[in-house]
Image (cartoon, helix red, strand yellow):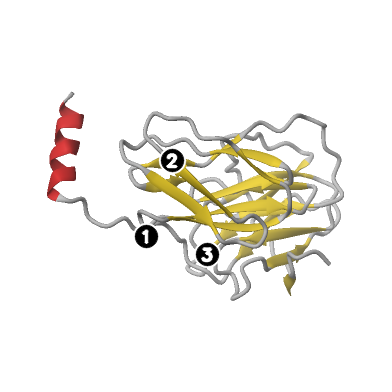
Amino acid sequence: MTKFQIVFLMTLWFTQGFSAVSAQETTSVDALTVTVLDSNQQPLALAVVSVNGVELATSEQPTAIMDQVDRLFVPYILAVRENAQVAFPNRDNIRHQVYSFSEVKPFELPLYSNREAPEIQFENSGIVVLGCNIHDHMQAYIYVSPHDLSRQTNAQGTVTLPLGATQVHVWYPSLTDVVTEEMVVPIVAGQKQLTVTLPVQAQHQSPPPASALQQRFNRRKNNN
């Protein structure tokens, strides 16, 4: 058992006539479409859905991006493979100080406007919780996958995966008190559609209201 512990083994249920697909993927007869819902039965974006034991085409992993935009991390959740390189650009006109105390990858990285920072490699699987020493409201997650394949749900809560796995692993922040725990759902042979409901509500960063100075700057910026 990996450090990603199995917390639930659920019975599955089907969704008939489901046709939405990820913007980056195309549904085919040889794919499994997974729909992830929150506790209110609403589509859950950015959930990480993983499988093992599937055939994958070998490809070089591009550098992943964890950006800083409007004093927020973008994206809120980033899924990468082990040994992935992650870049931390800063599209704000202010300084950030990104850090993580997570056991899997502790680091501290100062970010300046219009200055490129070194990429960081994430060698080991686990959950990296990010914060900013300057802006306490900023928080994000890097999911370093221990699985053969991990993909994230789109705005409709869906993702497509190749057939061949016997179960899917689904992760989202605050699923349990243990940050690495995942929900594990069995797959019936030949199954093409699966709906998973997580006992969570959608999470997001909540920035404080802009100061008067920031409001004036934003108005000037928008008028240019």
Label 2: few (<14), some or many (≥20) within 10 Å?
many
Residue 171 drawn at (x, y percent): 64, 60
N-terminal of the pair, mark 2 or mark 3, is 3
Type of amino acid at the residue the image marks with label 1: Asp
Relative depth, front residue between 39 and 110: 110
Question: Which amino acid, by three-letter code, is at mark 2?
Answer: Leu
92 relative to 191 in the view: left or right: left
Disc marking residue 38: 3
Residue drawn at x 82%, y 59% as measured from the top left: 188
Q: Residues within 10 Å of mark 3 (few under 14, many from 20)?
A: some
Which residue: 71% across, 33% down? 61
Estimate the spatial distance between the alpha carbons at disc 2 and disc 3, rounded to whole Å.
34 Å
Along the viewing direction, whichever of 1 and 57 lies nearer the viewer: 1
Disc 1 secondary structure class: loop
- Residue pointed to by mark 1: 136
Q: 58 left or right of 32? A: right
**Residue found 47% across the figure and 49% down from its top:** 98
Q: Which residue is mark 2?
A: 111
- Residue 6, percent across and down? 75, 70
Vertical side of 110 occupied by 124: above or below? below
- Earlier-in-chain disc, 2 versus 1: 2
Q: Can you tell which mark lies on residue 98?
A: none
Above-or-below relation of 57 to 97: above
Q: Nearer the viewer, mark 2 or mark 1?
A: 2
| x and y, in percent, of residue 8 in the image | 72, 73
